[in-house]
């Protein structure tokens, strides 16, 4: 997985828990104190190590993985991605706008980078106006998808109603 995710996680933890907490997470995963994912944004980082970084960080911080996903989702959508990838936020005015372009963002823009294996999203509009959005990725980070979606709501001041359908889909209602 691209190091941009790891760097955002590093920044999320520093922002929420301080530099010394991040140092403990680094130690837990066997990274040197001098290491920063800031130098590896475009690099591919081993999949197993990537998932472990989330899991061991949550354990080290003594929080649920879901809580860490939520904090990551907020930091990604409110601070990190608008600064790193402003082009994707300029045209969007709501969570709905961002979500309908999400598969395009990941496939066309990120998918072109060598080694990238971005998640896919499919869209099925329902008769009642809701959107059934399905997440497809071998990484199984469906929970992270939901956390990022909640981050979008904060960013755009939207209130999306979210109903889980099975293990990979969300039925979404927009205002
Ligand atoms: C400007 C906006 C965004 C950009 C530039 C972006 C970019 C990326 C990149 C580079 C990756 C790593 C892919 C790889 O290494 O193969 C990734 C992963 C991911 N993104 Fe995004 N992303 C954005 C917004 C979002 C949002 C808003 C959501 C959900 C609502 C989302 C859901 C995910 C998930 C769940 C993953 C984890 C990888 C997986 O499950 O396979 N992204 N994204």
Image (spheres, grey):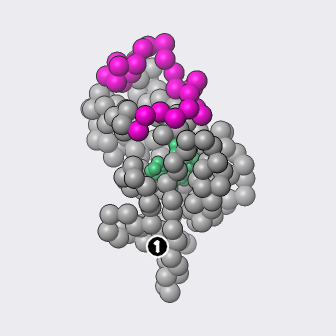
Give residue 110's position: percent from left, percent from top.
61, 48
**Residue 103 appears in view:** yes
Magenta residues span 23-47
Give residue 5's position: percent from left, percent from top.
50, 38
Image side of residue 24 versus residue 154, left or right: left
- Above or below, 173 relative to 88: below
Q: Secondary structure at mark 1?
A: strand
**Residue 54 appears in view:** no
Residue drawn where x is 72% and y is 49% of the image = 87
Residue drawn where x is 36% and y is 37% of the image = 48
- Above or below, 136 relative to 88: below
Q: Specify few, some or many for label 1: CA neighbours under 10 Å numbering under 14, 14-19, or 20 or more.
A: some
- Above or below, 158 relative to 109: below
31 magenta-colored = yes
Which residue in the protein does label 1 denote? Answer: 132
Residue drawn where x is 65% and y is 39% of the image = 84
163 magenta-colored = no
Residue closer to the observer: 54 or 71: 54
Give residue 85's position: percent from left, percent from top.
67, 43
Q: Is mark 1 within 8 Å of ligand 1?
A: no
Quarter of the image with the C terminus is bottom right
**What number of labels is visible?**
1
Residue closer to the observer: 2 or 145: 2
- Above or below, 27 relative to 7: above
Residue drawn where x is 44% and y is 13% of the image = 33
Give residue 88's position: percent from left, percent from top.
68, 52
The furthest residue to the front: 114
The furthest residue to the bottom: 127
């Amino acid at each position: 997985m691209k190091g941009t995710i790891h760097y955002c996680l590093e920044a999320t933890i520093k922002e929420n828990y301080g530099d010394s907490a991040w140092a403990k997470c680094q130690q837990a995963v066997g990274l040197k104190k001098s290491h920063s994912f800031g130098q590896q944004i475009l690099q591919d980082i081993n999949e197993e190590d990537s998932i472990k970084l989330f899991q061991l960080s949550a354990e080290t911080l003594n929080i649920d993985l879901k809580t860490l996903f939520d904090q990551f989702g907020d930091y990604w959508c409110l601070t990190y991605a608008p600064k790193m990838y402003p082009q994707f936020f300029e045209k969007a005015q709501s969570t709905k706008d961002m979500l309908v372009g999400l598969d395009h963002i990941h496939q066309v823009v990120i998918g072109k980078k060598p080694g990238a294996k971005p998640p896919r999203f499919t869209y099925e509009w329902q008769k009642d106006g809701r959107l059934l959005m399905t997440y497809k990725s071998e990484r199984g980070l469906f929970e992270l998808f939901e956390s990022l979606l909640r981050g979008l709501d904060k960013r755009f001041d939207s209130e999306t109603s979210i109903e889980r359908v099975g293990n990979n889909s969300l039925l979404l209602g927009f205002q």
